[in-house]
Amino acid sequence: MGSGKGKARRAQSKSTATGSWADVDKQRWAQFLEQSGTRKVSLLTYYRTKKSTRKQEAEELACHLYADLVGIGAIRFPSGEDVEDFKVSIDNRPSVYAGIRPVTTLLLTRIATGEERIIRQSPLEDLHTGNRLGGRKVERIVGDLLAAFYPA
């Protein structure tokens, strides 16, 4: 067995896959948390959001995370595109598992073409305001958001 570093190296490298919407660098998020000292800060404390429903609140938190990922350079767009050319939203969509009713789905949409990519299905627990920026659940959302910019 190898040392297990291949996965970490792939996560650090820029995406060059055909169909990618942007270059991503997951290590930027870890660096941001370390340098800002916000690893243990809750989403609510950091983003100060309070909406009337969990779905609205989760969508706002996802939008804030997306904007921060762009701001710290974890998402770098090709020339001519920027943060406003993409939209993060939550909607009910058919489950990726056949035969199951529609579920709450976190989506990334390229506004110019209307093309959508699923970031995560059932994201409300991971985007709960009590979760910490450096916690496992937020890390999962960040990883899925970054991965949505390039196809598997």
Image (spheres, rainbow, N blue to C red):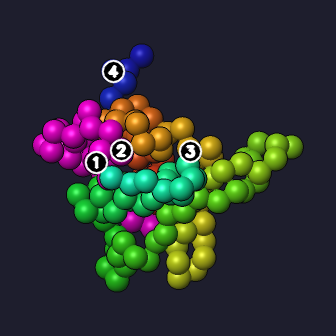
Q: Residues within 10 Å of mark 4 (few under 14, many from 20)?
A: few
- Give the residue at mark 4: 3
CA distance separating discs 4 and 3: 32 Å
Q: Amino acid at mark 2?
A: Leu
Q: What secondary structure is found at the residue carrying circle 1?
A: helix
> Is the Cβ of the residue at disc 4 closer than 8 Å to that at disc 2?
no
Q: Nearer the viewer, residue 99 or 5?
A: 99
CA distance separating discs 3 and 2: 14 Å
User: Left of 104 or right of it: where is 120?
Assistant: left
Seen as rendered, the residue at the extreme front is 52
Which callout, 4 or 1, points to the residue nearer the camera?
1
Q: What secondary structure is found at the residue carrying circle 3?
A: loop
Q: Give the numbered dot on residue 43.
A: 2
User: Left of 100 or right of it: where is 50?
Assistant: left
Which callout, 4 or 3, points to the residue nearer the camera?
3
The quarter of the displayed image where residue 70 is located: bottom left
> Is the Cβ of the residue at disc 2 closer than 8 Å to that at disc 1?
yes
- Give the residue at mark 3: 123
CA distance separating discs 4 and 2: 34 Å
- Give the residue at mark 1: 46
Q: Position of residue 75 (x, y in %)?
A: 33, 60
CA distance separating discs 1 and 3: 19 Å
**Within the magenta stretch, is there residue 34?**
yes
